Amino acid sequence: MSIIVFPAIDLKGGQVVRLAEGDMGRATVYGDDPAAQALLFADAGAAHLHVVDLDGAFAGRAVNADAVTAIVRAFPGHVQLGGGIRDRAAIERWFALGVARVVIGTAALENPDLVRDAARDFPGGIVVAVDARDGMVATRGWADVSDVSIVDLARRFEDAGVAALLFTDVGRDGLLKGCNIDATVDLARATRIPVIASGGVKDISDIRILSLHARDGIEGVITGRALYDGRLDLAAALAVAAA
């Protein structure tokens, strides 16, 4: 079985950046033309893209809408978008623009009915972000940590029809420490919802190991800094993921 590789484009102030552990003060800028970056990923063979409006995640509303729009118009594949999507109007607006999936994090914890209703009305289009610090759900751009465990949050949506869970170990994100494969696989085995791995992918070995767990419920993996720093070749990662 194959898994999906999602190259990541994180947006801050209209630029392509990567954060360390979700800290907005620890951003590395990789470019100022997000649409051009999307095309580079497409040229390497990517059919899926993961985009995050980092400013939006903190503001609770779209901040980098122009950049997201440019990416969606430029990228020929499927765009998955997260960051500050916390109400029905935002969900509808992004689908109308052409986004394939929207990722809901904070609102999934605070307003689960929003997720349930959207998953019903937009089949296959809703992803729930399960962002964790030490096994507990982090919200509001990872600035706050709740008292809800990642498994508890995931199980709340097992009957909701969500497309996938996006699991990020915040403590590894952007640090090239390697994906927290054990925690990701444990979550996939604990729920019937497919899981997308994110946070800390360091090289092709993470892609290879995650691919071996497709039958456990791993749908895909998001990678950012490893691509931008040249530690991971996207074409090679796509080949391994498809094997």
Image (spheres, helix red, strand yellow):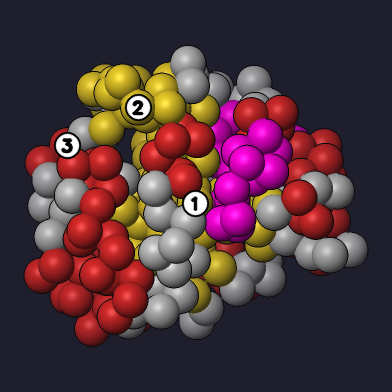
* Residue bearing the label numbered 3: 58
Near mark 3 (Cα within 10 A), the count class, few <14, some 14-19 or many ≥20, is some
Near mark 1 (Cα within 10 A), the count class, few <14, some 14-19 or many ≥20, is many
Query: In the depicted view, which residue is nearer to us: 145 or 45?
Result: 145
Q: Of the residues under marks 3 and 2, which one precedes in the sequence?
A: 3
* Residue bearing the label numbered 2: 148
Amino acid on which disc 2 is placed = Val
**Which mark is on residue 165?**
1
CA gap between label 3 and label 1 equals 21 Å
Is 12 left, or right, of 195 in this rendering?
left
Residue found at x 41% / y 23%: 136
Kind of element beneath mark 3: helix
Near mark 2 (Cα within 10 A), the count class, few <14, some 14-19 or many ≥20, is some
Q: Of the residues under marks 1 and 2, which one precedes in the sequence?
A: 2
3 vs 1, front mark: 1
CA gap between label 3 and label 2 equals 20 Å
Query: In the depicted view, which residue is nearer to us: 133 or 178?
Result: 133
